[in-house]
Amino acid sequence: MKARAKVNLTLEVLGARADGYHDLRSLVVPVSLADDVSFAPADDISLSCRCGEAVDASFLGALDRNLVWRAAALLRSCAGCSAGAAITLEKHIPIGAGLGGGSADAAATLVGLNDFWGLGFSREALAEMAASLGCDIPALVHGGAVLMEGRGERVTHEVPSPVFHLVLAFTGVFTSTGKVYARCVPQLTSGGQIVDNMRRAIQGGDPQAVAAALQNDLAAAAEALHPEIAQARVSLLAAGALGASMTGSGSCVFGVARNAVDANQIVRRLAEKGVTAVPVHTCPVM
């Protein structure tokens, strides 16, 4: 099963909460870069992991604390069953890049094991379970383009939109989400204008309008901590991206391309400058 990475086309930080989190509003869309999660019959839950060349395995930690393991155990507990599965995770999404790789893996595990075990939970019920595991997971359980609000637990499906072509540029740094949020100064609320601008852009199918509507309130804080992020953004623009923004709390930066051919050209130009990048496209439909 594909566990798709995500990008935040918009990300607004609306203020701190009493529970230590922040209130967010973010338009999130999955992209074609994905991990693979597969399941086989077993008496108990087990997890094995293989890492592609873009993934630093040292960041994985103990497998029994992996979000995939925790998602499987949570689903089994909520179902009140003793089902087992031998789970294999093949990692391609870089860790600590703001692409939601771990969250995507957990979401794919909940959805995949729900089918594999024949439990019959709705996506909405799975998303409610997912909220206890991590802020991005409910959005990725729902699949497709979504508006994520609160600390991530409130998810609304967006109308399916055209596919857009992006370039992901990897900085090679590992960002601390906590440190980025600690440096972030919440912006005055736009009253939804930022999301509305992006909605109009993506529904119009115009990559230039999408590029102009990009917004990430965490970017300034992340760039202050890691100048490599700002350098990647500037490199994307110099290579021909229509606009560039950071996803999540970093450290990956993405650029908007006119089309697939343009995305591949941007990747080649970045490679000439020593910047690692890959072309992807959005996956706006569940």
Image: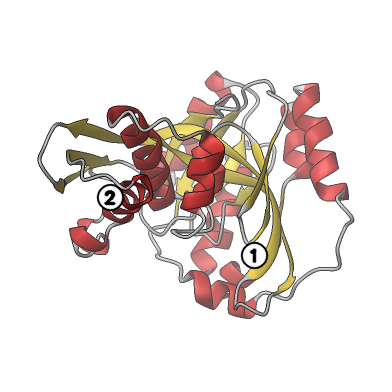
Screen quadrant of the C terminus:
top right
Q: Is residue 216 above or below residue 111?
A: below
Observer-nearest of 264 and 214: 214
- State the image coordinates of residue 244 (x, y, percent, origin top left): 64, 46
Q: Which mark is residue 218?
A: 1
- State the image coordinates of residue 113 (x, y, percent, origin top left): 31, 35
Which residue corresponds to the image point at 32% horizontal and 28% vertical from the top-left? 118
Q: Earlier in the sequence, mark 2 or mark 1?
A: 2
Amino acid type at circle 1 is Leu
Observer-nearest of 265 and 277: 277
Q: Is residue 127 above or below residue 249?
A: above
Dot 2: element: loop
Categorize mark 2 by other alpha carbons within 10 Å: few (<14), some (14-19), many (20+). some
Q: Which residue is mark 2?
A: 55
Residue 25 falls in which quadrant of the image? bottom right
Is there any visible trace of residue 225 in the rendered image? no
Which residue is farthest front? 80
Residue 182 falls in which quadrant of the image? bottom right
Which residue corresponds to the image point at 34% horizontal and 33% vertical from the top-left? 112
Which residue corresponds to the image point at 63% horizontal and 34% vertical from the top-left? 145
Amino acid type at circle 2 is Val
